[in-house]
Image: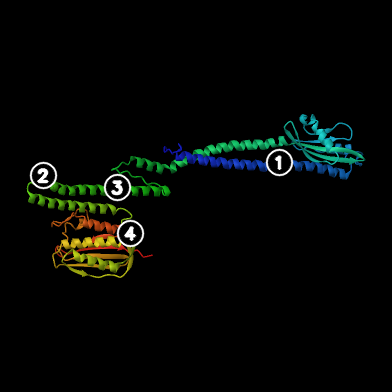
């Protein structure tokens, strides 16, 4: 994976380093704990062996019988000597006899460091009376010394057990060294596996990055190949869905700009043509041209206003939901519509229910439908307004008895700049605005299925009912 973070390391490298660091930390903690536990166990074992040797000497002293003569011991020196003759020291251990008179003797491996050190006999001499256990360090080597005074026939000898602790710890140090080497090898192997797994797990993110880099403005055709069934798979699907929405939005914007350019071209041409032929010396011609140009400017202003409204319809704040009384909204729309034309305005039905919607936008849509009905009817024709509740759908409609919608236009009646053959003022954006308002409420605008041309038309808004908190 080639993605580089701000820190200079890729996500894959950071994940691998994190796994390796956590593994190494865990292994070090386990190694320290193992070393501490084994050290305590080793110290306990050394003390136990020393106590065992001293205990066996004490039992022999309590028996008081010389194994060789089967007679009581004649001296303390003989007691310790008999004990050394019949006992073998443990590894790294030496049994000593410091007699009442004479030089010390020992059983076990020779240890010149201990034998040549004046500290050892000095320690034995200090403990000759009380006895006990003491640590002695000679030349960096630590010894555990147990001293047991032996009194027999007013004679005092000293039994000593020395244990080379460093030598006993050599096996523990070797074990820890082996553990450290195996731990280091384990960290390397785990880091390699973690890097491989991170690469596989982050492969969808790599493809997402490559796809995003390949997308240019106006070219949103790239899509991710969805694989797997996990969180990253959901990310892939979400990214593809986002591209679909962006592509639709850009296509809609392009169509809007193309249509707007096409529709603005005509009034601009009219303006230019009249300005070119106007006779500045003829006051009547100037006044007529002025009135015509102002009318065209007003038409362009309305076109721009409608286009801006359609553009705002894509924003989340296009509608502001609030509790609305549908009956009052329907009656209010009917009262406002009466001013649109001399028609037979009728209230078909209404429902008394409180729902969440944007009353101003819905009223705007109903009045737009009413204006459309006025344009396709004649004075005296009937136009009906109504509302009703069908399950979880609120329906509001405008119907008329005019000439209806031609069969050729019914499929595209809500498309932008869709106009019938009759010449009515406008740009064909009214029904597009109505549809945008309905969709902003998660609903839809539709042309109710009608009979043959000339039987009138019914336009209906279907909006999901949102309960009032």
| Marked residue nearer the N-terminal end (3 or 1) | 1
* Residue at numbered disc 2: 276
Q: Which of pointers 4 and 2 indicates the residue nearer the eye?
A: 2
Circle 3: element type? helix
State the residue position of label 3.
247
C-alpha gap between disc 1 and disc 4? 78 Å
Q: Which of labels 3 and 1 is toward the front?
A: 3
Q: Position of residue 463 (x, y in %)?
A: 30, 62
Q: Quadrant of residue 125?
A: top right
- Name the spot of residue 234 as percent of width and height, x first: 40, 50
Of the residues tagged 4 and 3, which is closer to the observer? 4
Disc 4 and disc 3: Cα gap in Å? 27 Å
Please report whichever mark, 3 or 2, sits nearer to the chain's N-terminal start. Answer: 3
In the image shown, does 339 or 357 lie closer to the viewer?
A: 339
Query: How far separated are the C-alphas under marks 3 and 1?
Result: 74 Å
344 lies left or right of 187: left
| Structural distance between the alpha carbons of marks 3 and 2 | 42 Å
User: Which one is in front in this view, the residue at disc 1 or the one at disc 4?
Assistant: 4
Q: Position of residue 343 (x, y in %)?
A: 16, 67
As drawn, the label of residue 450 is none
Real-space CA distance between mark 4 and mark 2, rounded to the nearest whole angstrom: 48 Å
Q: Are marks 4 and 3 in contact (CB under 8 Å)?
A: no
| Element class at badge 4 | loop
User: Is residue 85 at least partly visible in the picture?
Assistant: no
Residue pictured at 35% horizontal, 40% vertical: 213
| Image coords of residue 462 (percent x, y) | 28, 63
How would you rate the neighbour count of disc 4 (Cα within 10 Å): few for under 14, some for 14-19, many for 20 or more? some
């Amino acid at each position: 994976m080639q993605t580089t973070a701000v820190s200079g390391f890729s996500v894959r490298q950071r994940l691998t380093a994190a796994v390796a660091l956590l593994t190494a930390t865990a292994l070090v903690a386990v190694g320290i704990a193992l070393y501490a536990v084994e050290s305590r166990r080793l110290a306990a074992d050394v003390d136990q062996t020393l106590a065992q040797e001293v205990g066996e000497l004490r039992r022999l002293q309590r028996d008081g019988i010389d194994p060789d003569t089967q007679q009581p011991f004649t001296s303390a020196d003989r007691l310790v000597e008999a004990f050394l003759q019949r006992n073998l020291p443990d590894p790294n251990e030496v049994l000593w006899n410091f007699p009442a008179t004479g030089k010390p003797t020992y059983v076990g491996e020779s240890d010149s460091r201990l034998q040549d050190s004046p500290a050892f006999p000095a320690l034995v001499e200090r403990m000759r009376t009380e006895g006990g256990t003491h640590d002695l360090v000679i030349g960096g080597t630590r010894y555990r010394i147990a001293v047991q005074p032996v009194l027999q026939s007013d004679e005092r000898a000293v039994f000593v057990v020395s244990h080379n602790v460093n030598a006993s710890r050599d096996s523990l140090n070797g074990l820890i060294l082996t553990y450290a080497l195996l731990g280091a090898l384990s960290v390397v192997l785990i880091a390699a596996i973690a890097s491989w797994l991170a690469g596989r797990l982050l492969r969808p993110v790599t493809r997402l990055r490559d796809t995003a880099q390949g997308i240019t403005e106006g070219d949103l055709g790239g899509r991710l190949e969805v694989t797997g069934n996990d969180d990253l798979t959901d990310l892939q699907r979400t990214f593809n869905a986002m591209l679909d929405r962006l592509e639709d939005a850009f296509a809609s914007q392009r169509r809007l700009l193309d249509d707007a350019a096409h529709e603005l071209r005509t009034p601009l041409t009219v303006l230019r043509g009249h300005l070119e032929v106007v006779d500045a010396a003829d006051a009547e011609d100037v006044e007529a041209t002025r009135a015509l140009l102002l009318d065209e400017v007003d038409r362009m202003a309305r076109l721009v206003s409608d286009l801006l409204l359609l553009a705002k319809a894509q924003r989340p704040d296009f509608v502001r939901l609030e509790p609305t009384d549908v009956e009052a909204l329907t009656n209010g729309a009917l009262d406002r519509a009466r001013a649109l034309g001399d028609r037979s305005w009728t209230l078909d039905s209404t429902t008394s229910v409180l729902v969440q919607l944007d009353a101003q936008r819905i009223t705007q849509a109903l009045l737009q439908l009413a204006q459309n009905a006025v344009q396709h009817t004649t004075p005296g024709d009937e136009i009906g307004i109504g509302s009703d509740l069908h399950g979880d759908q609120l329906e509001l409609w405008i119907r008329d008895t005019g000439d209806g919608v031609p069969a050729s236009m019914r499929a595209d009646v809500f498309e932008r700049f869709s106009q019938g053959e009759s010449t009515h003022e406008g740009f064909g954006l009214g029904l597009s605005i109505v549809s945008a308002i309905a969709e902003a409420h998660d609903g839809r605008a539709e042309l109710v299925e009608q009979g043959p041309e000339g039987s009138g038309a019914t336009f209906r808004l279907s909006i999901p009912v949102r309960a009032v908190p």
